[in-house]
Amino acid sequence: MTTTPDPDVRTDTAYAEMDALGVGALWRHLGGLFPSEPPARAIPYHWDYRRLRPYMLHFADSLSIEEAQRRVLMLLNPGMRDTSATVTGLYAGIQIILPGEQAQAHRHSSNAFRYIIEGAGAYTTVSGERVHMSPGDLLLTPGWRWHDHYHEGEGPMMWLDGLDFPLVNSLDTAFFELYSDAAQKASVPDDLSSLQFIHGRLNPSWIGDRGPSSPIGKYPWTETARAFEAIADHATGSEVDGISLEYTNPWNGGPVMPTMACRVQRLVPGFHGVARRHTAATILHVVRGEGMTVVNGEEFHWHEKDVLAVPSWASYRHLNDSRTEDAVLFSYSNEPVVKALGLYREELL
Ligand code: GTQ
């Protein structure tokens, strides 16, 4: 069937006229809208902690916590600066707090966690529970819980903040509120949730409020170290990730929060991982040791406390060339989101 062309419509002006009507021509955008493979907006990127630390100390000295509210250096992926993302859907920042400082209590719909890098003597209060921090601890602040940070120890304290706000913002689901006071009052014993839940497979069965996030405020480094020691050399782990352990939600064995999966992995001396790629975007933090990750053929040499962005569908492999020292990496990814939507793919290369 043919139709009679409308004499008032001319192709040479139609695209501009349609644009003004909020209309586009699919045939001019097909490649961009349906790429054959995920196009990388995020690029593979490495943040060298030794280069960031002087700036953190500078602003700790020159900018009060009241002015800053939260004194954080954001790790911005050069390909995603418009959304302040580190990789797609995820953000990483390094926060520094000095003795006696109080970071204002607030809550947001974004899920957050902290992975402690340096220092001792600070705590975060989450929903009335004071959670004390030591290096290597993972602290959770699931969405919409009040939280504030206080440092009662000596010397500066630094940690890695992981949040899903690039995802939450892209879904237009962001809410934020300041608390009525600078700090919450403690309403339960300190570190209660870790004390109640962290022991092996035994969960407190009287607790009925089973939301989508882990109820554990802190996964202490001491437990991670115990797990690595117990496994010791009895397992080689996976050929891609070595001895990789996932922090889990005790209610369902799944990821700690609905938008972020957190893991910690030990790469034994001489570990040469197999390359792979997957559709989960990943951020890695070096807990200890040094080594190399090859991302899309580019070598990133990392040291303790560095951060590395691995975009979706980038191929990557880890190497620890030390003959004597382990390397330990903490990582988080948007894998739970990608899996929940049926979009997860992975392959070994
Ligand atoms: O400590 O609550 O890096 O709200 C970014 C936003 C940390 C926090 C960040 C935040 C926080």
Image (spheres, rainbow, N blue to C red):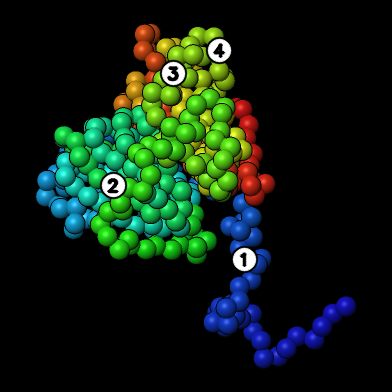
Which corner quadrant holds the C terminus? top right
- Residue lying at 27% horizontally and 54% vertically, measured from the top left: 183
Q: Mark 1 points at which residue?
A: 28
* Mark sitting earlier along the chain (3/1): 1
Q: Name the residue under label 4.
A: 235
Residue 153 x, y percent position in the rendering = 19, 36
* Mark sitting earlier along the chain (4/2): 2
Residue 162 x, y percent position in the rendering = 40, 44
Q: Mark 2 points at which residue?
A: 149
Q: What residue type is labelled 4?
A: Ala
Q: Which amino acid does label 3 sit on?
A: Arg
* Mark sitting earlier along the chain (1/2): 1
As helix, strand or loop, the secondary structure at mark 3 comes to helix
Q: Can residue 41 be seen here? A: no
Few, some or many residues within 10 Å of mark 1 (<14, 14–19, 20+): few
State yes or no: Cβ of the residue under disc 2 lies below 8 Å from any atom of ligand 1.
Answer: yes
| Drawn side of residue 278 relative to residue 272, left or right | right
| Drawn side of residue 18 relative to residue 134, left or right | right
Q: Are marks 3 and 2 in contact (CB under 8 Å)?
A: no
Residue extending farthest to the front is 206
Measured Cα–Cα span from mark 3 to mark 1: 57 Å
Residue 289 x, y percent position in the rendering = 34, 20
Using the image as rendered, state which of residue 174 and residue 142 is in the foreground: 142
- Residue lying at 88% horizontally and 78% vertically, measured from the top left: 1
Using the image as rendered, state which of residue 321 and residue 237 is in the foreground: 237
Answer above or below: position of 46 versus 223.
Answer: below
Answer above or below: position of 336 versus 200.
Answer: below
Few, some or many residues within 10 Å of mark 3 (<14, 14–19, 20+): few
Measured Cα–Cα span from mark 4 to mark 2: 38 Å
Using the image as rendered, state which of residue 316 and residue 198 is in the foreground: 198
* Mark sitting earlier along the chain (3/4): 3
Measured Cα–Cα span from mark 4 to mark 1: 53 Å
